[in-house]
Amino acid sequence: MTDTKKSIHGEWSSRFAFILAATGSAVGLGNIWKFPYITGENGGGAFVIVYLLCVLLIGIPIMMAETMLGRRSRQNPINTMITLADEAGADKNWHYLGWMGVIAGFLILSYYSVIAGWASAYVLKAFTGSFFGADAVAIKGLFDGFMASPVQLIFWHTLFMLATMLVVVRGVNTGLEKAVRFLMPCLFVLLMLLVAYAMTFDDYYDKGIKFLFTPDFSKLTANGVLTAMGHAFFTLSLGMGAIMIYGSYLPKNVSIAKTVYLIAGTDTAVALLAGIAIFPIVFAAGLEPAAGPGLIFQTLPIAFGNMTGGWLFGILFFVMLVFAALSSSISLIEPAVAWLIENKDMSRQQACIWSGSITWLLGLGTVFSFNVWSEFKIFDRTIFQLLDYLTANLMLPIGGFCIAVFAGWIMKQQHTEHELDMPDALSYKVWRFLICYVSPAAVFLVFLHVVGVL
Ligand code: TRP
């Protein structure tokens, strides 16, 4: 493998471009929509601590490994695993890891797009003044009414899928990179503003902040621990090849380690800021933290409806949320698109049409989970809940586990050392220890815990 190898799809124009794109992929609905509601469902503080530990001990080392695999092979995740397994003299079956990733991407995007559709619809609702002066009951009514309409949900899901494919079809440099350039900083500023607003509540500290940061481990179940770990993968976009494909567009001379710290740090900061902004509003409005996937849609509009300038901030916030979702959704489909182009001889356009249509169709399962099929349960879960559990809690951690084992035990040490190019020998040793022992063992133990062996 030569150092001059490039991806046929192009390359990021700079390290900064990669940081933007990878941060764009990491920061999304996971941080602002999912993190608050799963934290609410799992009792708060203790869940947050487990999540943070997972980011640190499992997420960051695996993110470095995944980026490294992609950059070394410069191909889609499936071919990456074939090439690198071959290089290491390992079994061919490693390419199933790439396959699982591509499938996980489809499944995640199918529901991700529906939720991003909700956010898009809320841009319009904010614009037309639907939140104006509304209390918690009115806002909940608005949300429930929206959920009850498959037609509306399908409309917004379709619109969001079209937007995603429109970006992806333009390719690495023109499409993906430009889209994330301006969005991330704006989102950050708006979140700070919401935090400042939340701080004006009397109970801001006593209820909101304490809920998030005071651990009560008696509230944390085995499944809660699994959800926290799964979310560490989900929020960092790990375990399915998204970061691998982005790594494959990464120029040679960039330090993977430093870049990964920055991305993971930003991602975590955005999630915590979202939590700090949302929980004070939840408690002040007398709402349930365990309200489920509707949580931010039932809380933030109350804030926008009652704060000065709330009309404008509401619009801006949901616009940013849609863009944050868009810069994530493109990374969920890019591995499949790259595979179709590389292996099936398709043009980028054809690849987008195929993969986009399949995802759209799958998304209907999630749309109906919130209305006509809400009583239809498999393993006690709606289709949406099942897809979420299957991908975030099972497929991503399993994918991450395999990536850790591959990077730590299968690849030649000199190759990983060369590719990671750490600033000093100690950092490499720490990474190696984490990737060989700590990360895989942690994932394994959490699974054992859930199965009830521990
Ligand atoms: N990380 C994104 C979020 O937090 C979602 C996402 C994008 C993702 N690409 C991914 C999740 C790949 C898992 C795998 O919203």
Image (tube, rainbow, N blue to C red):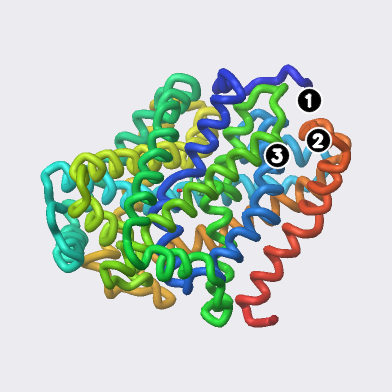
Task: Examine the image and state in which quarter residue 33 appears.
Answer: bottom left
**3 vs 1, front mark:** 1
Task: Point out which mark residue 82 bears.
Answer: 3
Amino acid type for the residue under numbered disc 2: Glu
In space, the residues marked 3 and 1 are separated at their CA atoms by 13 Å
Q: Nearer the viewer, residue 153 or 219?
A: 219
On the question of residue 354 being in view, the answer is no
Residue 23: image location, x then y, percent: 52, 38
Q: Classify 376 as above or below 100.
A: below
Q: Name the residue under label 2.
A: 87
Q: Which residue is drawn at 69% across and 26% down?
A: 254
Q: Dot 2: within a 10 Å radius of its alpha carbon, few (fewer than 14), some, or many (20 or more) residues?
A: some
In the rendered structure, which disc, 2 or 1, sits on the residue that comes first in sequence?
Answer: 1
* Residues marked 3 and 1 touching at CB (< 8 Å): no
Residue 97 is left or right of residue 411, and the answer is left
* Residues marked 2 and 1 touching at CB (< 8 Å): yes
